[in-house]
Image: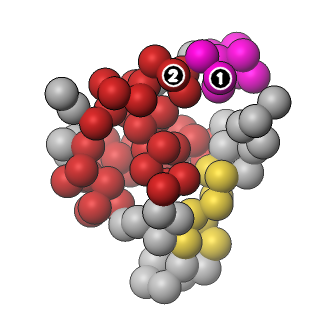
Amino acid sequence: EKYSEKYSEKYSEKYSEKYSEKLGETQMSIIKMIKLDSFITRIELSGKLDVNIRAIDKHISILKKKGILKRIGPDKGGHWEIIMDTDK
């Protein structure tokens, strides 16, 4: 079973209530992975989710535009920050 399939349904419901457009399975998985490790790299995300690096870049860009995700600091040494409150 893919990691993304395991968590997608649970978190999809939580986020879809806040956004008119439902987030995709890969986007939900990216959020979950960043919650577990805010210092994870795009390459690590690509490997763990078994998704092409260019697809990871595209999904991260979408999450940034929606105001869900933000990069703090430089590419090396920086970290990801989830901007929205997911507990409501």
Q: Quadrant of residue 13?
A: top right
Q: Which quarter of the picture shows residue 67?
A: top right
Q: Residue furthest bottom?
A: 77
Question: Mark 2 Cα within 10 Å, few/some/many (few <14, many 20+)?
Answer: few
User: Along the line of sight, which residue is nearer the eye, 76 or 8?
Assistant: 8
Q: Residue at x 34, y 27 (%)?
A: 6
Side of 38 where 86 appears, left or right = right
Does 83 appear in magenta? no
Label of residue 14 in the image: 1
Image quarter (top left, top right, bottom left or bottom right) of the C terminus: top right
Q: CA distance from mark 2 to mark 1?
A: 7 Å
Given the current orientation, which residue lies at the most extreme right position? 88
Q: Position of residue 63 (x, y in %)?
A: 57, 41
Left or right: 7 as drawn, with respect to 47: right
- In the rendered view, tell whether residue 45 sits above or below residue 43: above
Give the amino acid type for the residue marked by disc 1 in the picture: Lys
Region rendered in magenta = 13-21
- What residue would you read off at disc 2? 10
Left or right of 23 in this view: 55: left
Whether residue 79 appears in this view of the structure is yes
